[in-house]
Amino acid sequence: MLKKPETLFVLGYMLLPLLALLSAIVGLTMILGGNKIAGAIVLVVVTQVFAFGAFFALRARKAAVLEESRRS
């Protein structure tokens, strides 16, 4: 399922960037609300995990599309 270009498209272009944006908003809200350490952790760690996940999903999608075009 995670090898299909359609699934990787949804993950790389829609779901993971949206989750990265939402976690950045949550982290900034936590920092501004006074919970600086937890907010910084959410902002740095969780947001970056989603951002790099989107990057790797797009790279995997590119490889899957190229392999699919070679088979045709």
Image (cartoon, rainbow, N blue to C red):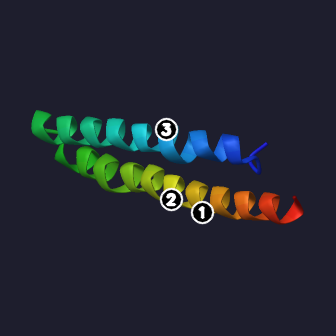
Gap in Å between the C-alphas at discs 3 and 1? Answer: 15 Å
Above or below: residue 38 compared with residue 61: above
- Percent coordinates x, y for residue 12 in the rendering: 54, 48
- Percent coordinates x, y for residue 67 in the rendering: 79, 64
- Percent coordinates x, y for residue 1 in the rendering: 79, 42
**Label 3 neighbourhood size at 10 Å, few (<14), some (14-19), many (20+)?**
few
Query: For mark 1, what is the residue?
Result: 59
Q: Nearer the viewer, residue 43 or 15?
A: 15
Q: Residue at x 43, y 38 (%)?
A: 19
Q: Amino acid at mark 2?
A: Phe
Q: Residue at x 43, y 44 (%)?
A: 17
Q: Secondary structure at mark 3?
A: helix
Q: Residue at x 23, y 50 (%)?
A: 37
**Label 2 neighbourhood size at 10 Å, few (<14), some (14-19), many (20+)?**
some
Q: Within the image, what quadrant is residue 9 found in?
A: top right
Query: For mark 3, what is the residue?
Result: 14
Gap in Å between the C-alphas at discs 3 and 2? Answer: 12 Å
Q: Nearer the viewer, residue 37 or 32?
A: 32
The reply to whether dot 2 and dot 1 touch (C-beta < 8 Å) is yes
Query: For mark 2, what is the residue?
Result: 55
Precedes in sequence: disc 3 or disc 2: 3
Above or below: residue 52 compared with residue 27: below
Q: Amino acid at mark 3?
A: Met
Q: Which residue lies most toward the front here?
A: 72
